[in-house]
Image (cartoon, rainbow, N blue to C red):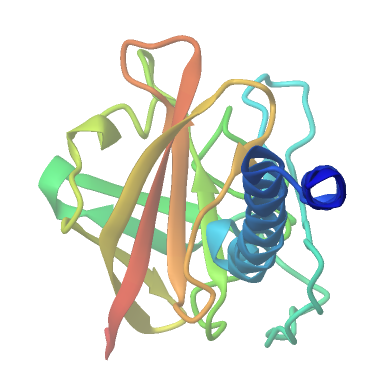
Amino acid sequence: MFKRTQRNQEYNQKRISPSVVAIIGATLTLIGGFFVSYNYIQSKKVYAYDYMANIFYESNEQEEIASQEQEQEQQPEETTEESDTYTDEYIGYLVIPKINLNKGFVDKRSSENDVEKNIMVIEGSNYPDVDKGNFIIAGHSGTGWKAFFNDLYQLNVGDEAYVTYKGKRYIYKISNIYKQPKTGKIAIYRDYDKTTLTLVTCTNNDDTTQTVYIAELENVEAE
């Protein structure tokens, strides 16, 4: 009897308690879930944003686009050659029928390409004729003659915007509208498989945010 009791005691000492087993199992499950979720999130980051845009609306600031890549190979980008010469004349027009907007834009290298003078084509963005490119335009809202984007707040998903450029009319439909804090940088969320138009302006009646309008190309027509 003594030997049997001794063996039972040795067995109980060697056996791992159910609570310890449960803790170990839960820990392993959490670790496995973390790695699965991490890989999934990393694979989807390319769809989460296009790049960070440093867009400033003060007259003495320099506007620029800073391209960001997150653990992915940079996709080849189709570009159009730009002439060494350009004028300060309008090279195209942005038309939004719903808000009666019809405003020209100049070459992005022109000194007139400034939110203090016109709607501004952001440096680093693509013109409308670049397949899967992103044509980014910034403009003031608020009051005064230069508040060209003052009525953008009236737009909704599904509304249309047109860009005329080099004898063609590019028809876009708004697919996303979102706000970003005024930190000097704006994250642009778009589909890499689509040719897009992005409009950026200060949020109506909100001094702390800016609003981004993403529109996807629906059709191209001859003027």
Q: Quadrant of the C terminus?
A: bottom left
| Residue 113 can be seen, yes or no | no
Q: Report x, y in % for residue 126.
A: 61, 69
Q: Report x, y in % for residue 194.
A: 44, 78
Is 145 situated left or right of 159 in this image?
Answer: right
| Residue 139 can be seen, yes or no | yes
Give the residue at x 51% y 54%. Answer: 189
Question: Looking at the rendering, which quadrant does residue 31 occupy?
Answer: bottom right
Give the residue at x 56% y 33%. Answer: 117
Check the image and name the residue furthest to the left: 98
Is 141 situated left or right of 157 in this image?
Answer: right
In this orientation, which residue lies closer to the viewer: 131 or 74?
74
Image height of 80 relative to 217, above or below: below
Image height of 154 relative to 113, above or below: above
Q: Report x, y in % for residue 203.
A: 38, 23
Give the residue at x 51% y 49%. Answer: 137
Is 66 situated left or right of 206 in this image?
Answer: right
Give the residue at x 50% y 54%. Answer: 105
